[in-house]
């Protein structure tokens, strides 16, 4: 009995314990559930708050767009509209364009707090894509037409009050102008010049870049639909202005003739079915060039020393492009195919190849050998030729480079200007070009050293071996085996993989050269060398160190700059050493002058411009040069800064504007402008980053801005740089990357200092 009671008591106690445990578990579960619910509610509230904030910001954006387009009666330039709207985060206009396309336009039917007319006008003006639900709503209020991209092209309300339609009159006027300008063209034209002419005729005075975009984005893609124009006029227009051919227009073209497109879908060649229209292959242009060259060399009996001059003369004729392009066309296209130009006599072609030092292809060599005896040099250029009938005899003069007066002067200058220093710089060639009257450019003399003096350095025995070694070290000349043997006899030498001196110690210990510790002194032979050397020092320091006291306030924490000036110089050296197609005498651009007084590195706002004009300091006037003017150069920098749309750059923009107002409009020396712009470009491309915490801009947009600012200057001197910028854009290396505003600002300041404005 007791045992039962005790067992019952134990059972009851166990039940109470279990109940207590369950109650405690329920309480804990309830607390846990309460905490989870509270966190969930907080998260929901946060999302609602964020959504409300986003909706509020989106409504402000919508209010702005409705206000901007309330009076629109034709499509607007959307980029300009979005640029005007910058919220407190100062996003790029690309961001606002994406918000419009992704957030506003797809949900336009839901914005019922705005009138249907306001929304239709907004979508029409900014080219928004109309979704199906909004299209149904529009159709209940009027008649609407969409294009293949579902954008409104025409709308008329039922009551007739609102009527929207593209301004076809302006497009027709633009198309008529282009058709007329290209009516008789047979080769590609300078599109920028064509557009600038049209801009001058238009009352709204827009920048030609607007019409450039309009052609490539509006006219060219819809060329097939413009069937009120003759098909051959449209084909000629697309060929001459390098328009991208759409698929439907390509089909139309093929029904009228044979067409070839490049990888960018641009017409490279076209022949109509009736044979009356032939475009492409540069047939006409090549014939004109050959006619000119044959005529200019018909009495020549020696190779031309400055072959660039003949191409320069040809390029200065009306409707011609850059002389360098014609040089490349001859050496890379005409010369290799000389055997096919049988409209000219064999004697004329042989003389032309001899005078311009063209490389003889195998098929042309066989043709030559059937008409006479020919001897080629190691570069397959004609050294000697005698016709079978003896009427034509050509022979390259046997000249000793060490006895050539120009080479002797050049050698004397190099020895003198490298005996106290050993800098690997291109400025020394600029000085000699200046002394020689700028007949040839610095790059020509650089090439002459690398291809004529350095390979025969052992033969210049009238100069001390130490002086020649010091010069070869300073100018990074390639050491041949015979000169290496002389060097070994005089001391210990070490070469790199390119056979250039990296270390040398003479037997008597008086000469010690090393790339790491050469004890180099700055050249002090002329005042200009001091100036240019100092400028180079300052540029390198600025590019390699952002913690300068003057800029530390805005540059702190940004990526470190890297030196790029030397890379440009080394690139020039590689070009001079490796390019087998163009003879060394071909100069690229005439060099006008160098600085003749010490620069003072002060902030732009405190620069003293009134102490002398650029012409006085550089020894040149605007009539002596066809380069870049000071005012145009400064305006191009202002365009860059304005397009970047950053408050950080406002002060610099103001300083440049003040500088332009108080500076005489003169010609800048090309030898300062080109390296400065190259340095800035290379510095900018090195600063591309996936992301940075500091204020930044899209790298791709920066490249496009730089591209159009260079085009705006309209200077043939900038052709190479324009090409490099375009290649960088096409390589897509900047896609998805940004560049800090501070690096752009520093690059602009470097340019201003480098050209000493």
Image: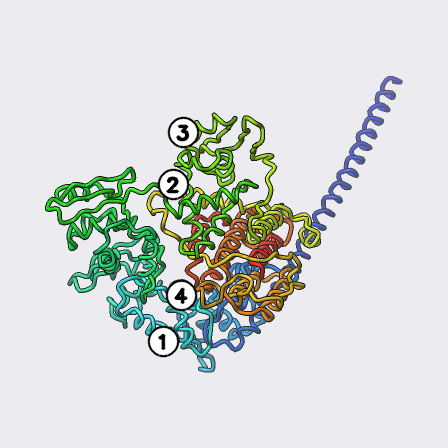
The label on residue 173 is 1
The nearer-to-camera label among 1 and 2 is 2
Asked whether the beta carbons under mark 4 and mark 1 sit within 8 Å of each other, the answer is: no
Q: Earlier in the sequence, mark 3 or mark 2?
A: 2
Residue 753 quadrant:
bottom right
- Spot the residue most to the front: 462
Q: Which residue is mark 4?
A: 192
Asked whether the beta carbons under mark 1 and mark 2 sit within 8 Å of each other, the answer is: no
Tell me the CA gap for discs 1 and 2.
Answer: 65 Å
Identify which residue, 531 or 215, lies in the foreground: 531
Identify which residue, 101 or 261, lies in the foreground: 261
The nearer-to-camera label among 4 and 1 is 4
Q: Which residue is mark 2?
A: 402
- Spot the residue most to the right: 2
Q: Which residue is mark 3?
A: 481
Helix, strand or loop for disc 2: helix
């Amino acid at each position: 009995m007791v045992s039962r009671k005790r067992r019952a008591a134990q059972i009851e106690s166990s039940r109470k314990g279990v109940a207590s445990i369950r109650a405690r578990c329920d309480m804990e579960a309830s607390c846990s559930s309460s905490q989870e619910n509270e966190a969930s509610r907080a998260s929901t509230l946060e999302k609602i708050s964020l959504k409300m904030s986003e909706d509020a910001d989106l409504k402000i954006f919508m209010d702005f767009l409705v206000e901007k387009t309330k009076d629109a009666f034709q499509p607007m330039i959307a980029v300009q509209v979005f640029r005007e709207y910058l919220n407190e985060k100062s996003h790029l206009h690309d961001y606002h364009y994406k918000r419009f396309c992704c957030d506003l336009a797809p949900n336009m039917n839901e914005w019922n707090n705005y009138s249907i007319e306001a929304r239709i006008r907004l979508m029409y003006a900014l080219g928004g894509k109309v979704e199906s639900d909004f299209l149904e709503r529009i159709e209940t209020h009027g008649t609407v037409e969409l294009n293949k991209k579902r954008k409104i092209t025409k709308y008329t309300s039922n009551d007739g009050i609102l009527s929207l339609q593209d301004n076809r009159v302006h497009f027709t006027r633009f198309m008529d102008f282009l058709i007329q300008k290209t009516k008789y063209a047979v080769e590609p034209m300078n599109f920028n010049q064509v557009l600038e002419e049209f801009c001058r005729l238009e009352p709204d005075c827009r920048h030609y870049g607007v019409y450039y975009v309009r052609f490539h984005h509006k006219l060219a893609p819809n060329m097939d639909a413009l069937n009120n124009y003759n098909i051959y006029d449209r084909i000629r227009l697309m060929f001459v202005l390098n328009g991208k051919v759409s698929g439907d227009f390509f089909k139309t073209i093929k029904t009228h003739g044979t067409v070839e497109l490049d990888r960018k879908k641009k017409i490279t060649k076209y022949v109509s079915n009736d044979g009356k229209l032939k475009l492409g292959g540069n047939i006409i242009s090549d014939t004109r060039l050959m006619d000119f060259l044959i005529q200019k060399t018909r009495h020549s009996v020696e190779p031309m020393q400055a072959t660039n001059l003949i191409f320069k003369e040809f390029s200065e004729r009306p409707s011609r492009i850059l002389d360098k392009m014609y040089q490349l066309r001859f050496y890379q296209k005409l010369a290799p195919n000389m055997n096919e130009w049988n409209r000219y006599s064999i004697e004329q072609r042989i003389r032309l190849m001899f005078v311009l030092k063209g490389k003889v292809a195998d098929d042309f060599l066989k043709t030559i050998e059937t008409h006479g005896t020919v001897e080629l040099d190691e570069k397959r250029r004609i050294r000697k030729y005698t016709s079978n009938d003896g009427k034509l005899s050509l022979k390259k003069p046997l000249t000793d480079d060490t006895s050539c007066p120009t080479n002797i002067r050049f050698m004397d200058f190099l020895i003198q200007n490298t005996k106290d220093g050993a800098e690997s710089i291109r400025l020394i060639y600029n000085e000699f070009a200046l002394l020689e009257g700028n007949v040839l450019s610095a790059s020509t003399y650089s090439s002459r050293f690398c291809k004529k003096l350095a390979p025969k350095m052992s033969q210049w025995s009238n100069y001390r071996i130490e002086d020649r070694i010091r010069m070869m070290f300073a100018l990074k000349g390639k050491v041949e085996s015979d000169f290496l043997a002389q060097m070994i006899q005089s001391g210990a030498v070490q070469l790199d993989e390119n056979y250039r001196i990296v270390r040398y110690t003479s037997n008597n210990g008086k000469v010690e050269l090393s790339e790491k510790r050469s004890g180099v002194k700055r050249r002090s032979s002329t005042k200009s060398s001091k100036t240019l050397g100092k400028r180079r020092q300052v540029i390198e320091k600025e590019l390699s160190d952002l913690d300068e006291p003057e800029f530390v306030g805005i540059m702190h924490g940004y990526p470190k700059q890297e030196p790029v000036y030397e890379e440009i110089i080394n690139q020039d050296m590689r070009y001079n050493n490796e390019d087998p197609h163009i003879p060394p005498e071909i100069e690229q651009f005439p060099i006008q002058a160098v600085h003749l007084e010490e620069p003072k590195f002060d902030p732009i706002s405190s620069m003293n411009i009134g102490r002398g004009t650029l012409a006085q300091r550089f020894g040149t006037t605007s009539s002596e040069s066809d380069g870049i003017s000071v005012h145009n150069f400064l305006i191009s920098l202002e365009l860059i800064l304005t397009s970047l749309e950053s408050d950080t750059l406002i002060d610099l923009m103001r300083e440049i504007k003040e500088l332009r107002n108080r500076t005489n409009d003169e010609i800048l020396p090309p030898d300062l402008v080109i390296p400065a712009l190259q340095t800035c470009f290379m510095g900018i491309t090195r600063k591309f980053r996936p992301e940075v915490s500091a204020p930044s801009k899209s790298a791709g947009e920066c490249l496009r801005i730089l591209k159009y600012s260079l085009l705006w200057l309209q200077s043939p001197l900038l052709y190479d740089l324009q090409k490099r910028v375009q290649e960088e854009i096409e390589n897509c290396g900047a896609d998805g990357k940004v560049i800090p505003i501070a690096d752009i600002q520093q690059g602009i300041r470097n340019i201003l200092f480098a050209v000493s404005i």
